[in-house]
Each structure stands twice: as C-alpha cells, then as structure tokens.
Image (cartoon, rainbow, N blue to C red):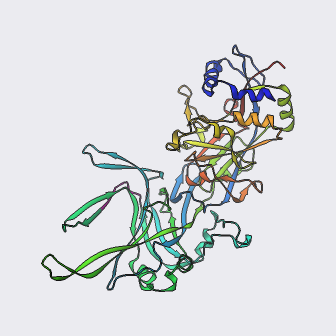
C-alpha cells in the first residue's frame, strides 16, 4: 500500500485543487463508467446508502451554550427550547449588614452579539445566534428536582447524563408560583444602560452589550436567601445545591410567532444578582457623624449541570422519510435529525484495493432541495464525522484552514460554505474525505459509516449520547453536540433522488497506476 501513502507527498493540497479545477469540465460520467481526460485524473462515482435518523432523546447537559425560545421553522415546524439549571451562590455563608434591604433581583443573560458604530460614533449592536423576531411566553420557576453530578446507577463513577425529552419529568417538581413571567418576550439589540453615583455624588451613565435582563421576584429571594442568613443551607456548595435545586426557564408559544436565541449560561456576566442597600454611619468632611446608604450585591451563578429540553413534532412528510433510504435527507438542529451515510460494501472495497489506485480527491456533494425549503435559510455548515468510531475524519484534522478565532471561515476545505451556481441557481455543500478513504483502503476496514449534521460552529466536534432514535443508532454511536445549539435545518437530495445530477454520491478522483 505504499502507493496510497504516496499521496501524502503530493506537493500541496492546493496543487491538487488547482489540478481538479482545471480539468473538471473534461469529466463525464455515465452509469459509473470511468472517462479519461488529458491530465490523467479520472472520476468514479459510487452510490451510497443514506437515510435520515430522528433523534428523539439526546444528551444536553454538556458544556455547550443552550437554546431558549420558540422557533417556527418553515420546513421542520415549531420547536420549543427551555433550560433547567442548577444555581450556585457566589459566596457561601453570606453575611448581610444590619438593616440590609433587598432592593431588586436581576437575571442577566448576555446575547451573542457584535459591536459597531453609528454615524455619531455611538456603539450599536447586531445580535448573533438569534432566530426569528417574534415573541414568546417566558417564565421562570424554582425546580425541586435534584440534578446529580454523578450517575448513582453507575456507582457514581460516571457523569450523570440528562436528556432533551425530560421536561415532563422536571415539571413534576416545580413550585407552584413563578418568580418571573413575561407573556410576550421579544429579544432586543439595545444596549443595557446603567446609572450609578460616582465619588462626586454625580450620576454616571455606563452601557453594556445587549442581554436578556429581567427583574425577578424580590419577595421570593428575600425568603429564599436573605432570610436564611446564618443557616446550614447557605453554608456550603453541596448544602445549597440540595436546598435550592435549580430554576426552569421555560419558553411557550404565543400564536404562530416566536424567536429562539443561544445563551452561554457559563459566561462571565451570566447569572443572578441580588442588589441590597444598607445604612452605615460615616464621618463627613466636617467631622460630623452622618448616616449614609450603601449598595452591595450577592451573585448567584448557574451551576455545572444545565439541561436543554426540546419539544416539537415533525410533519407527516418528514416522518415518512425517516428511516427510509429516500429521495431526500432531512438534517435538523436542536433535538433534531441527522443523516447516516454508509459507504461501500465488502465487494466494492475488495475491488478498490485490488485496483491499486492513487486517490487524489474524494468528496460528497450535498445539493439543497430548494423546492422543499419553503424559503428557509440554510445553515452555514454541515459536519461530517466517523459515526462508527465517534471521531473526526482525518481530513478534518489535516485541514490547513483551521482558524479558532473565526469558526465560520475555519475548516472550509473539509466542509465548504454553501456554494451557489450562478447559472443554475442550485446550492450545494462539499464535504471532503480524501484521507479518510485512503486510510480505509490501507487499513482493510470493512465499511465506513458516517454521520452528517447541521452545525453553527465547525470547531465543536464533541459527540453526545443518544437515548432514543428512529431508527436506532448503534449502542456506542453518538450524535453531534454542535447540532443541538442551532434550530436551523436543511433538506438535501438523498441517495435515491430522481434527479440524477443532484443525487448524493461519493465522488472519487484518482490516477490509475498501471500496476
């Protein structure tokens, strides 16, 4: 197999791309036949087995950001996303000054946003990772469901997993009264204004980036925190977790409207602040004893266990495509769906190895079925991974366009941005698996089973457990965690599409060695 290893010695990936681009117009393919061209590079297309898997229950208590809100997708229908989270005191055994009065309790969840300047030089913001522009009902209630860090069924040796379909269970443990309700919440790109008194007793105005910033029930936190000063419940992290087990931040639909947004609950400015004032005697400039009012705060952050829950049902059309090798693949985020692609049978692999070909390029082209998209925006990226081994493809690791600071323009050789043909208007994604195919041939593997999912961040490659799916995945097969942080979806032509030119196939460019 030294011939296959020789591919690694090709001058650069860019030379290969230039070569393919220069001769691509010379290719034609009918029924899988090999047509030669002047450069010596040939093309072969392989039919693959591809089908949609409906992920009905997926692990969501990972370190990823969480979705919150209601999103009406033109293809995949209405999706609801809520969040159950532990909460943690900023300081155990807090002490409040004598005469302290709780003035307000504020929840702050910054949006992902970018800053620019208007014509007058004032900061303006553009919200990122916000889908839709309508309102939804937002409520917050205390949860008495205890979120374990470790799984008791595994002798506390493995981290506890919580899943996207567990909201009905969690809601059995909610307190009766809400600590916040907004019957029509709409995200805003307005910056947050703060007015504070400076050392000269003058009002200072400062601003921060846009956030979901709301006032919670003062009476609730007075009883829950302030009145518990000196208690065992506030004396340690573990005691507090057992005493104040969490909050459910719930989204519910209002008519056919909605919006959904992504939040980093572990972010620096995410959490709850209890603002309290208290009197204290001080000495003024004339040496007189006077009473002044001071303001302080106690922070409550979100804990380590944060669970995203999802609700929603797919249409009959989508359900009929699930588990079938059909004309289309339905790829959806959130709880979502993924595509499973099975490459080669045993005989095809044996034939390929026997031919001793030099593989120049191998890719999958996934064409968007615009007739079924109903005007929906397609996601910026698709993520292809080794489903059998729950790992990234070799081509992902070797992609030189890796840019940690710019995920949108990172790994673009491995997973292209949507490319639209100006003449036909058709849009496709290109996913490369050149080195993965070479490795498959060299190492005598029997098959290659891939997963493909939508993603909003190609840098996130972690897999998460699937508890239930249709059809069932393998016992150790994982779904992509990145697909749970976007509600976007796309319909692409499948492996049995009646449109031969847009059918999903494995395209292999190679050079015959003559041996």
Residue 485 in the figure: left or right of residue 183? right
**Which quadrant holds residue 118?**
top left
Q: Nearer the viewer, residue 209 or 502?
A: 209
Q: Nearer the viewer, residue 137 or 117?
A: 117
Residue 357 in the figure: left or right of residue 489? right
Query: Farthest left residue?
Result: 286
Q: Is residue 73 magenta?
A: no
Residue 28 in the figure: left or right of residue 128? right
Image quarter where the C terminus lies is top right
293 versus 338 height, above or below: below
Residue 297 location (% of width, % of height):
37, 73
Residue 338 location (% of width, % of height):
67, 49
372 versus 35 height, above or below: below
Query: Farthest front residue?
Result: 287
Q: Nearer the viewer, residue 368 or 365?
A: 365
| Residue at 25% in and 78% down | 293
Main SS of residues in magenta: loop
Which segment is the magenta one? 186-193
416 versus 140 height, above or below: above
Do we see residue 266 in this rendering? yes
């Amino acid at each position: 197999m030294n011939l296959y290893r020789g591919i690694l010695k090709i001058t650069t990936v860019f030379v290969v791309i230039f070569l393919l681009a220069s001769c691509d117009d010379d290719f034609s393919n009918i029924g899988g036949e090999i047509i030669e061209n002047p450069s010596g590079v040939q093309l072969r297309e392989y039919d693959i087995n591809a089908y949609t898997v409906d992920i009905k229950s997926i692990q969501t208590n990972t370190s990823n950001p969480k979705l919150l809100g209601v999103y009406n997708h033109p293809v995949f229908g209405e999706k609801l996303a809520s969040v159950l989270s532990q909460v943690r005191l900023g300081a155990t055994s807090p002490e409040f000054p004598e005469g302290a009065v709780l003035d307000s309790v504020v929840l702050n969840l910054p949006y992902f946003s970018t800053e620019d300047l208007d014509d007058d030089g004032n900061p303006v913001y553009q919200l990122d990772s916000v889908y839709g522009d309508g309102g939804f009902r937002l409520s917050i209630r205390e949860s008495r469901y205890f979120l374990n860090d470790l799984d008791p069924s595994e002798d506390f040796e493995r981290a506890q997993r919580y899943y996207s379909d567990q909201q009905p269970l969690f809601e059995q443990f909610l307190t009766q009264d809400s600590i916040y309700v907004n019957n029509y919440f709409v995200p805003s790109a307005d910056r947050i204004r703060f007015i504070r008194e400076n050392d000269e007793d003058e009002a200072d105005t400062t601003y921060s980036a846009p956030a979901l910033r709301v006032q919670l029930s003062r009476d609730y936190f007075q009883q829950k925190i302030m009145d518990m000063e000196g208690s065992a419940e506030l004396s340690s992290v573990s005691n507090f977790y057992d005493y104040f087990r969490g909050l459910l931040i719930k989204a519910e639909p209002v008519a056919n409207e909605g919006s959904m947004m992504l939040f980093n609950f572990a972010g620096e400015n995410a959490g709850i602040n209890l603002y309290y004032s208290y009197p204290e005697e001080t000495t003024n400039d004339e040496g007189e004893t006077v009473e002044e009012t001071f303001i302080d705060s106690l922070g409550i952050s979100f804990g380590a266990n944060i669970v995203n829950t999802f609700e929603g049902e797919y249409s009959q059309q989508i359900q009929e495509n699930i588990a079938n090798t059909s004309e289309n693949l339905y790829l959806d985020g959130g709880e979502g769906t993924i595509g499973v692609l099975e490459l080669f049978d045993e005989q095809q692999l044996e034939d390929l190895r026997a031919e001793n070909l030099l593989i120049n390029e191998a890719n999958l082209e996934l064409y968007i079925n615009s007739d079924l998209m109903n005007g929906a925006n397609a996601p910026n990226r698709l993520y292809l991974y080794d489903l059998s081994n729950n790992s990234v493809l070799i081509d992902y690791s070797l992609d030189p366009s890796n840019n940690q600071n710019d995920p949108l323009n990172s790994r673009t050789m491995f997973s292209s941005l949507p490319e639209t043909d100006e003449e036909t208007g058709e849009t496709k994604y290109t996913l490369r698996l050149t080195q993965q195919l070479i490795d498959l041939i060299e190492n005598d593997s029997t098959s290659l089973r891939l997963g493909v999912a939508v993603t909003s961040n190609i840098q996130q490659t972690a897999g998460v457990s699937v508890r239930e799916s249709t059809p069932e995945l393998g016992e150790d097969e994982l779904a992509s965690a990145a697909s749970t942080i976007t509600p976007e979806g796309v319909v692409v032509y499948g492996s049995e599409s009646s449109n031969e030119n847009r059918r999903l196939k494995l395209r292999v460019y190679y050079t015959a060695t003559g041996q």
